[in-house]
Amino acid sequence: MILALLTAVVSLYYYANVIKMMYFAPNESTYHITPPAPAHLVLLLGAAGIIIFGVYPGPIMKFALETARVFGF
């Protein structure tokens, strides 16, 4: 019990410092990263797939059930 509490306190200290550096430290970087066009395309297709299959999961569920039936699950 004591070990769990000690590790929780250590991890809280570590992650609190990470959050502090992310949100409250001044941004000293002069670099500006611009992803290439194919990366934008991949992100757009992935997001569209998640939204479409999240709203209408019927086709993917049918495919999964048919595949499971073929393999004998």
Image: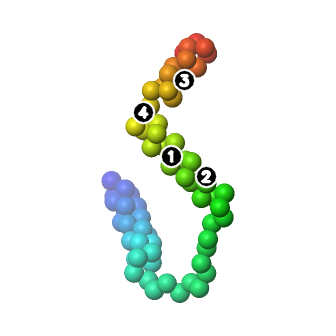
Query: Who comes first in sequence, dot 2 or dot 3?
Result: 2
As helix, strand or loop, the secondary structure at mark 4 comes to loop
Please report whichever mark, 4 or 2, sits nearer to the chain's N-terminal start: 2
Q: Amino acid at mark 4?
A: Tyr
Q: Position of residue 30 (x, y in %)?
A: 59, 85
Residue 63: which numbered mark, if any? 3
**Nearer the viewer's eye, disc 3 or disc 1?**
1
Viewer-closest of 46 and 69: 46
Residue 42's label in the rendered image is 2
| Front position in the image: 59 or 25 | 59
Q: CA distance from mark 2 to mark 1?
A: 10 Å
The residue depicted at 66 percent of the width and 57 percent of the height is 38
Q: Residues within 10 Å of mark 4 (few under 14, many from 20)?
A: few
Residue 20 bears which disc, if any? none
The crowding category of the residue bearing disc 2, from other C-alpha atoms within 10 Å (few below 14, some 14 to 19, many at least 20), is few
Q: Can residue 10 be spotted in the picture?
A: no
Q: CA distance from mark 4 to mark 3?
A: 13 Å
Residue at left 45%, top 43%?
51
Q: Secondary structure at mark 3?
A: helix
Cα–Cα gap, marks 4 and 1: 12 Å
Quickly name the residue at label 1: 48
**Contact, CB < 8 Å: mark 3 with mark 1?**
no
- Which residue type carries mark 3? Phe
Give the residue type at disc 2: Val
The residue depicted at 42 percent of the width and 33 percent of the height is 56
Q: Position of residue 40 (x, y in %)?
A: 60, 58
SS for dot 1: helix
First along the sequence among labels 3 and 1? 1
Label 4, on which residue?
A: 56
